[in-house]
Image (cartoon, rainbow, N blue to C red):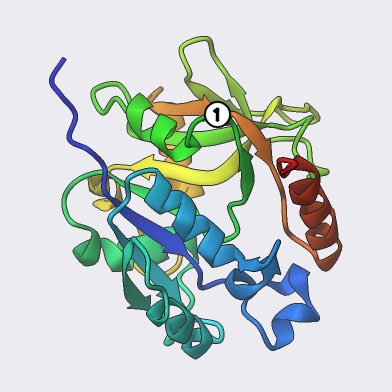
């Protein structure tokens, strides 16, 4: 087994319309919605920096000028480049594919801009990067327990084998894990993908078929911030978790 180069680049998905967050997102893009005093996008970028990411690409479409202006004012790591999708919304997979020239030839991290969690003792992104094993994995997902994730009411996404391999949940089943919105991917996976808009789920399913989609359980608590009501619950949970000085 050879030493795996450190992963230092990330792509942050910040181009979505945020329809479920209306009316807030009528005037503020979802990545700039504040939770516990900071924009969701800043929470994601701060997590990226804590995990060793030095360079990030942020895509923009809806209310793009506001996001561009916001990231331009950041004074802390990572260094940010914008991928402009004003002409057409490309979904998750198409957005990453468009930005590949900015991301280079090595594996990179993909963040949902609203990926938000309370950390355990160590950086979950740092743990994810440390667990990356390209000889056995095409994609590694950060996954969170369905039962303990705040604000999530779905049936879960994945079942995880003892070696970390992931499978989709079956119909009419409840799966123990949900995708926490952070993944490590190889750029070569995009070679045979559609032009224009497509979902990263296409790549997830291809990796499952090859038995090369793996997961790492989040150490902490994932907070699903999908609606205005969820912001209130997330802020209360953050406040409850804060150390007493």
Nearer to us in this view, 36 or 145:
36
Q: Name the foreground residue: 107 vs 31.
A: 31
Is any part of residue 198 visible from this angle? no
The image shows a total of numbered marks equal to 1
The residue depicted at 34 percent of the width and 61 percent of the height is 77
**Left or right: 11 as drawn, with respect to 67:** left
Question: Against 193, is 182 above or below?
Answer: above
* Residue at the image point whose x is 28% and y is 55% from the top: 54
Residue closest to the far left:
2
Where residue 70 sits: x, y (%)?
48, 81
Residue at left offset 75%, top offset 41%: 244
Placement of 22 over or under 133, stated as above or below: below
Q: Which residue is mark 1?
A: 121
Q: Secondary structure at mark 1?
A: loop
Residue 156 sits in quarter: top right
Give x and y (percent) for residue 222: 67, 41
């Amino acid at each position: 087994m050879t030493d795996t180069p450190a992963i230092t680049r990330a792509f942050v998905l910040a181009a979505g319309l945020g329809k479920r967050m209306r009316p807030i997102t009528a005037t503020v893009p979802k990545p700039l919605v504040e939770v516990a005093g900071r924009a969701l996008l800043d929470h994601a970028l701060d997590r990226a920096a804590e995990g060793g990411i030095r360079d990030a690409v942020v895509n923009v479409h809806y209310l793009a000028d506001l996001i561009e202006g916001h990231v331009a004012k950041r004074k802390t790591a990572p260094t940010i480049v914008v991928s402009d999708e004003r002409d057409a919304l490309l979904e998750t997979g198409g957005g990453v594919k468009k930005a590949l020239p900015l991301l280079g030839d090595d594996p990179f991290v993909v963040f949902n801009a609203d990926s938000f969690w309370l950390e355990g003792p160590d950086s979950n992104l740092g743990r994810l990067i440390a667990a990356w094993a390209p000889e056995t994995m095409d994609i590694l997902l950060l996954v969170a327990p369905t039962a303990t994730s705040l604000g999530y009411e779905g049936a879960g996404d994945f079942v995880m084998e003892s070696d970390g391999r992931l499978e989709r949940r079956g119909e009419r089943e409840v799966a123990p894990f949900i995708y926490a919105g952070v993944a490590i991917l190889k750029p070569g996976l995009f070679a045979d993908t559609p032009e224009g808009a497509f979902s990263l789920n296409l790549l997830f399913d291809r990796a499952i078929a090859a038995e090369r989609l793996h997961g790492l359980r989040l150490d902490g608590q994932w907070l699903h911030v999908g609606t205005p009501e969820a912001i209130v619950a997330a802020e209360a949970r953050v406040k409850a978790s804060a150390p007493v000085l």
